[in-house]
Image: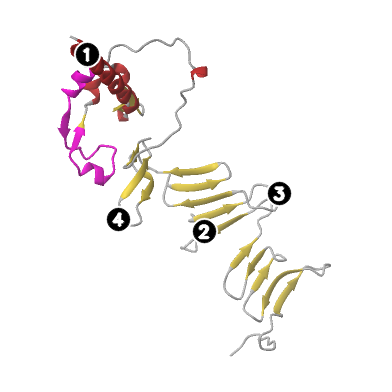
Amino acid sequence: MGGVYTTRPAGSSDSAFACFQQGTPAYTASINADGSASFANGSFVVNSAGIIQTNLYSSGTLHLDSTGSFNGPKVVLSAIDGSGVFSGTVAATQGAGNYVNLQPNGLIISRGGNGGVLYTGRNGSSGADVITFNDSGAATFTGNITAGNVSDIKFKENITDAHPQLDDVVTLGSSLKNWDWKEEAPLNEELKSKRFLGLIAQEAEEVCPSLTYEVGEGKDSYKAINHDILVMKLLGAVAELKAEVEALKAK
């Protein structure tokens, strides 16, 4: 069998093959006896365990592709600063318009078509989807959402007493409906499979316009209920109802 063979003592990590640039002692590539390899003076290394190490420094990219063609790499690493610490872009692509970019300033997820799920949070025990973000701008949360609401008086002006709420709440209560969700509803499959109880946004809007708001833009937009305002109206209605009861007791 023809070829070139190089041997080194057992356990040695010495170079079995090395290339040097003319006029300089620094090698540009080496293949070592333990199976490791180094290229461009250590900027790209495959160690004896098969682990790939690379330094992109302030420029350069690393492409990973399962097909071997590298025409449309599945993962791209790009360095964009000169600090010696990677702070570039991690990009994974699959098809036109479908990609995930992890950048120093945040995570960008793109879908090629409308209506696709950008992010899904899944319960590890039940396997149920508990959080979804769609590329239409819709988001679904199956549990409670906790957020810090600003309510300090120093940020408010033109403060007045709220209008009577009891009549509105009674009207809204008489408008409660049960329904099944259509397939195109911007909800996850678990929620769409359940029968719901609640208000119809268009009907609630006739009672109190501030109870509803628009989600999205154009033909894909839809109305939603502002439950924070609904709770405030309920608080006002309870106070008014108590005052009426107290007035009856006093007679």
188 falls in the magenta region: yes
> Which numbered mark, 2 or 4, is in the foreground of this view?
4
Q: What residue is pinned by disc 4?
A: 126
Above or below: residue 23 compared with residue 124: below
Q: Are marks 3 and 2 in contact (CB under 8 Å)?
A: no
Q: Residues within 10 Å of mark 3 (few under 14, many from 20)?
A: few
What is the x, y in percent for residue 61? 60, 54
Secondary structure at badge 4 equals loop
- Residue 51's place in the image compared with 11, above or below, is above
Q: Position of residue 24 (x, y in %)?
A: 82, 67
The quadrant the N terminus occupies is bottom right
Three-letter amino acid code of the residue under disc 4:
Ser
Residues drawn in magenta: 168-197
Q: Where does residue 243 sit, x and y in percent of width and height?
A: 25, 14
**Camera-side mark, 2 or 1:** 1
State the residue lying farthest toward the bottom: 1
Q: Nearer the viewer, mark 3 or mark 2?
A: 3
Near-viewer residue (18 or 116): 116
**Position of residue 243 in the picture relative to residue 73 (left or right):** left
Q: Is residue 218 left or right of residue 108?
A: left
Give yes or no for contact between labels 4 and 3 (Cβ–Cβ under 8 Å).
Answer: no
Q: Label 2 sits on what residue type?
A: Phe
- Residue at x-position 21% and y-position 21%: 172
State how far apart marks 3 and 2 are (Cα). 26 Å
Residue to which mark 3 is pinned: 82
Query: What separation in Å lies between label 3 and label 1 (alpha carbons)?
Result: 72 Å
Q: Is residue 206 visible?
A: no
SS at circle 3: loop
Closer to viewer: mark 4 or mark 3? 4
